[in-house]
Amino acid sequence: MRRSGIRPSHVALILSMLLAPALYAGQTNPLTVLDGELLTNQAGLPMLKINGREEALSANTPYLLHTLEDKRLAGRQVHLEGIAKPDGTFEAHWLYTVHDGKLYSVRYYCPRCNIVALEPGNCVCCQQPTELQEIPKPANSH
Ligand SMILES: [Zn+2]
């Protein structure tokens, strides 16, 4: 008795078509999304812990790399958007912290000078440490 013509290769193709939308936040966003816990390893390099597995992180700008290395963000639940590299690391392009399922942008702010900095460190103006702030992410924007 002949069965219908669905071969395993067809099943795999159909599955990948069904799963593909779940890998992306939306069709307009081609970046890969990773949600996990931000950590730094013993060498101080940023890692993302996902389901008990740790993935090495890099970033497409030094500013974002320094933010990923910020000890104040260690252990935090984060949402990264970026590109999975062939060497197995993940290059982050966008970082958000997650609170109650909502995304927050991270920025560094000097309240004395009213200056926003791109990365952790001292204010370029008064040389005092900047504050880490989390700003609710507006819908459909980075
Ligand atoms: Zn300042």
Image (cartoon, helix red, strand yellow):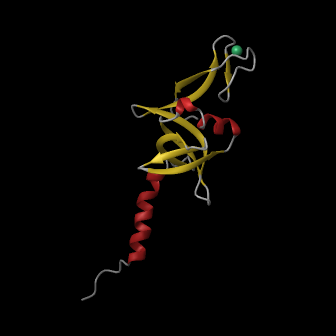
Q: Does 106 sit above or below residue 11?
A: above
Is 29 situated left or right of 36 in this image?
Answer: right
Q: Does the rendering let one see residue 25?
A: no
Single out the residue that lies furthest toward the left.
1
Q: Position of residue 25 (x, y in %)?
A: 49, 45
Query: Which residue is at 53% across, 25% downward?
Result: 134
- Give x and y (percent) for residue 135: 53, 25
Q: What residue do we see at 66% from left, 30% from top?
A: 119
The correct choice, above or below, for 84 with respect to 63 in the image is below
Q: Which quarter of the frame holds ligand 1?
A: top right
Q: Is residue 118 above or below residue 11?
A: above
Farthest top residue? 112
For the residue pair 116 and 137, the one nearer the viewer reads as: 116
Furthest residue toward front: 42
Is residue 32 left or right of 121 when viewed as pictured? left
Q: Residue at x 52, y 49 (%)?
A: 27
Q: Residue at x 43, y 75 (%)?
A: 9
Hey, which residue is sitting farthest bottom in the picture?
1
Quarter holding the N terminus?
Answer: bottom left
